[in-house]
Every structure is written in structure tokens, then in C-alpha cells.
Amino acid sequence: MKIVLCHYHLHQGGVSQVVINQIDSLLSTVSKKGKPVKEILVLYGDNESHSLCEKIQRRAQSSIPVHFKNIPELSYDNDNTKNLYFKDRTSLSAASQTLTQKIIEVLQGFGFKKEETLLHFHNHSLGKNAALPLAIWLLAIGGSHLILQIHDFLEDLRPNNFQYLSRVYRNEQSDNLAALLYPLLPNIHYFTLTDRDRQLLIKANVPPDAVQTIPNPATEFPPLPSRYESREKLADLFSIPQHCQLILYPIRAIRRKNLGELLLWARLADRGSRHIRFLVTLPPEHEEASQYPTWKDLIQRLQLPVVLETAVPGKLTFHENLAAADTIISTSVAEGFGMVFLESWQIERPLIGRVLPDIGEEFQKAGIITPYSQKTIDLPVSWLGEKKIKEQLQQIYSQTCSDYQRPAPSVDWGKFMTDDLVDFGRLPFLLQREILLFLDQEPELSLQIRQLNPWIDQALQVAIPSANLHRQAITPKEAFQEKQREVGSKDRRLFQEQKQLEQLLEKNRLAIKQNYSLKSIGNRLQAIYTDILASAQPPRKANLKAIKKNTTQTSSLLDDLLLYSESLPTVSGKVLLDFFLSPDRFYPVRVT
């Protein structure tokens, strides 16, 4: 059995890191008893990954051969490509056939035969490359065996991507678009990151035996850099006293990460404090930067203890940021999986902030406990006025529905304001800003928010102890032991709190190792790959002649694929949009 992993790029972080972790997970399962996966080939688009490829190949030398091949046609569509597709429908059809042929030629060049090969695509349907979903159809009807792993859904508040595919496919009906993006053929299987997404696909008409849940593997961190040296470097670069409590948000500050809520935490923590700093590692990419300048301005204007861009080139490395941190925080309102909920406990740092209900429930089932996180931060509706909140929510929600070519229902937004309270994360971007300015003028009201949300004070007090930071090699476990010896005879309560935190960190670390380790996910992947290939069926031959014949007529490829899909069961785009556009799931900071 040979595996081909396909992604748009291999840049650091995100889905690319999952691809790398999957390779490592497969390598970790090699034993003397045999290795079902005999060879791995990675196809990627944007060609900026030579050093990464060489590093992985060196790790794989003694186990499974791993090859890398750049196919430029797998990259994200750029503006020139998009404009060409808008103007000339035949260019998209031609591009999909070119991409298909390139993939086939590479497979043949490496000796990967159809009957022994699984093509595993990541995020094929996200609207980043319009030719890719059509190429997947052509590969499937040509007899290849495919796995389509969905990390993020096009329907999940990504209206720009949805509009782009709708326009270039000349098709604005969600069900027709879904039929093209999520083909239901006997030689195509789906992977989802969570059981929630698996159940959603099943509800949308994917056969239960054609979709499996494969969580992201949580690779073990190498030993972190010296905590002392990392904090010293941070102090030198950003003028942060070493004695400060450091709360790290290890993310790129895109909209769904809800940066305004981090600023709220900073205001609640300690007005003008010299004893606490909130760190954010990376700025957003250009297309996600609409809110970022406002938050940067507010940090400076309100003198909030927030330091941005601590992991950009020339500053601290990602691992140095982790080493320096006392606590990890997340204020995100949406995640495909939520690696921070695993990584924080892996590096023995407590996690505080916002927990996502469906994601949190899956981690809880795996034995991971998050006592310092809650679903909401409540504040009085009267501070903004119920009418203003409802009007802005309805306006932004209506625009979002319109962006998805759907009529906007009138929603009773009052049901989200229980007991005259509203969740800060539910507020639109500009209303979040208004709250922060309001608290600056009325600082005593910060106490009212802490009283309404008493868990916040508890969360802010949780941290890896900073005992003996001058010792460069100190680990979190050593810090716990020294702190417990220091306070044991003086403050029994503090001793117990430290002991409970140490036990929690260890319990969560072991739960992650058992359920999400490289070896655990690698064994699961190997077993599912084997089952899929063993039970693989070819597409229905009776329906292939016309589509194969017409794929040479580039002007009608899209119509041919839609016509062909009509003879098959299809995924319901309506079910997907109903779920992701539900008012219950709507957080306007994601789209404004």
C-alpha cells in the first residue's frame, strides 16, 4: 500500500503541520512485524519548503521512503488565475485537466499503481483552487482511490470563497455546488477531524461507512528552550520585566481568534498592571487584517498590557514563546479542531479562556479536563442597549446570508441575552471596541464583569510557578516542587492548589498521549487505509463512457460533471449551510 498526501503548500503551521504530523505518525508505527504503508509521496503546490522536505526525508531514511514533489498547479489561485476563470469558462476546464494529468504523470514516475495507492487530499473543497475539485472528479472516474479530508468547510462563514466557486462554476445553487465539491462515488472516502463533522456529513447524505473521524495527531514537543533565557530575550526585545506573569495566545490573529476578547482579559486582569502581560505570536495575513489595526491602536491608546507579534522573524521563536509562558489562553470562537487545547497541556502549561462547546465536549470524552475555561464572558446588555445589539446582529447576519445567496430570516436575537446579559464574544467587532472604550472611561465596571464571571479571577491566578527563574534549566515540574517546598509549611491552601494543578497537567498530558499521540493516530490511519484499499470499489462503469468522452470538450466539462452527478446520490448543500449559518453558531467577529 502506498499513500499520496496532497496539499496546496507546506508552509509552517495549520493544515501543513497536520500533513507533516501524519507523516510522522505513519513513521512511528513501523515495526518488525511489517508496515502496511510501504511508501509515502507528498504533492504540494507553493514551492517554499525545501528544508522541511529534506528534514522529513532524513527522519524517514530507516523506515518508510518519503518523497516530495512540487506541482505548481496545486497552489492557491492568484488574482490573475481568478480573473481568467471569470472571463473564460474553458480555462477552468483546461486547468483541471492539466492538474489531473500532472498528478497522474507524477504517480507513474514514482511507480505508484492505482490498485495499490490511496490519494489523500487535504481541504480540497475550501475554494482556494477552483480546478482541484474538478480534478478530483476526473481522478475518481479514472479509477483512482481517494480520501478527502476536510479541516474547514467552505460553508462555515467563508462567503468570499463560496462566492468565488459559485461564480467560476457558473452555479449559485448550493446543492449543485455541493454535488461538485463532495462527490459520492464508491472509490471516494471522507475524513473529518471531529465526530461532529462526521455526523454533519452523514446528515448531508454521505454514507456512514464512507466517512471516518481522524483527529489531528499531537506531536510530542522537543525539550523547550531555557525558560530563563526565553524570558530574558523577551524582556530585551519588548521591555517586559522578567517577573511578569506571561499569558500567551499562540496564534495568528485572524478574525475568528477573537482578539478583542483578549484585550478584554487584559483590561480585567489589572488596569495598567506591571505584573502581567498578554502575548500574541503572529499578525494576520493580509486578507484577514481588517480588524487588526483597530486592536493595535486600542492597545496603545488604552495602555493595555498586550504585546503583539512576539514570534515574527527576528523576535522569539515559537518554542521560545512557549518556554517563556506561564499560562496559555484561547479566546477563539471557532475551530476546525483546536490544537491549542492539546498543545498547552503537552508543554505543561494550564489553558484558560473560552471553550468551544462541541470541540470541548469531544476533548472531554477523551479525558481532557479544562476547568479554567468557560463558554461565555457575560456583561450587562444595558451597557450597549438591547436595540443596538439586536439591530447590528441582524444586519450582519442578513448580509452573511445574502453572501451565501440565501434569504435572511428574521431572528429573535433576544434569546441570546439571558437575564439581561450578553456574551462578549457574540458582539460585533465595533461593539466589542465600544465596550473596551467604555471600560476605560468607567474602570470600576471591570469589577462588575469579574463578579458576573467569577471564574475569570480564578483563571488569572493559574500559572506555572516562577520559582528560581535564575536557574536556566528549570522545568515546570521542578518549579512546582520548589514552590510546594517553599509554601508547604506557610500556606497549606496554596500548597494544595499547586499540587492540584500539577496533577491536572499530568492527567491531561497522559490523556492526550493515549488518544492523540503520533503512534495512536498512526495506527488508526494504517488500519483505515488498509480497510479502504481492501474494500475499494471502482466507479460505476456504465456511467463513465459519456463523461470520459466529453472531458476532452473543455467547454462542457462542468456541465458534464453536473449531469453525471445527477445519476448518483448527492450531498445536500442546504443541510451544510443550515448548520453553519444557524444563528446559534453565529459570531459576527468572524465576518466583519
Image: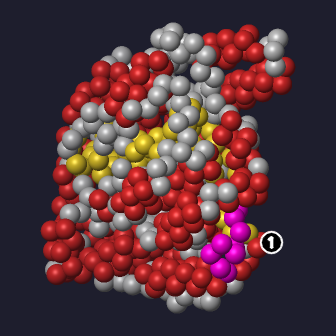
Q: Which amino acid type corresponds to the residue marked 1 in the rendered image?
A: Asp
Q: Is residue 275 above or below residue 223?
A: below
- Residue 297 drawn above or below residue 579: above
Task: Specify the quadrant of the image occupied by residue 62.
Answer: top left
Placement of the C terminus among the 4 image quadrants: bottom left
427 left or right, relative to 497: left
Boundaries of the magenta span: 378-386
Is 7 included in the stretch rendered in magenta?
A: no
Q: Is residue 458 left or right of residue 295?
A: right
Q: Is residue 8 above or below residue 199?
A: above
- Mark yes or no: residue 74 visible: yes
Residue bearing the label numbered 1: 419
Of 460 and 144, the residue lying toward us:
460
Q: Position of residue 122 (x, y in %)?
A: 40, 51
Residue 3, compared with residue 451, is above or below; it is above
Q: Position of residue 351 (x, y in %)?
A: 62, 39
Query: How many numbered markers are drawn?
Result: 1
Q: Position of residue 345 (x, y in %)?
A: 61, 32
Q: Is 469 left or right of 252, judged from the image as shown?
A: right
Residue drawn at x 45%, y 80% as measured from the top left: 404
Secondary structure of residue under mark 1 = helix
The answer to whether one can see residue 580 in this image is no
**Image point 71% across, 69% down: which residue?**
380
Image location (x, y in percent) of residue 190: 51, 55
State the residue at coordinates (67%, 81%): 386
For the point 57% across and 63% down, which residue is it? 441
Q: Quadrant of the N terminus?
A: top left
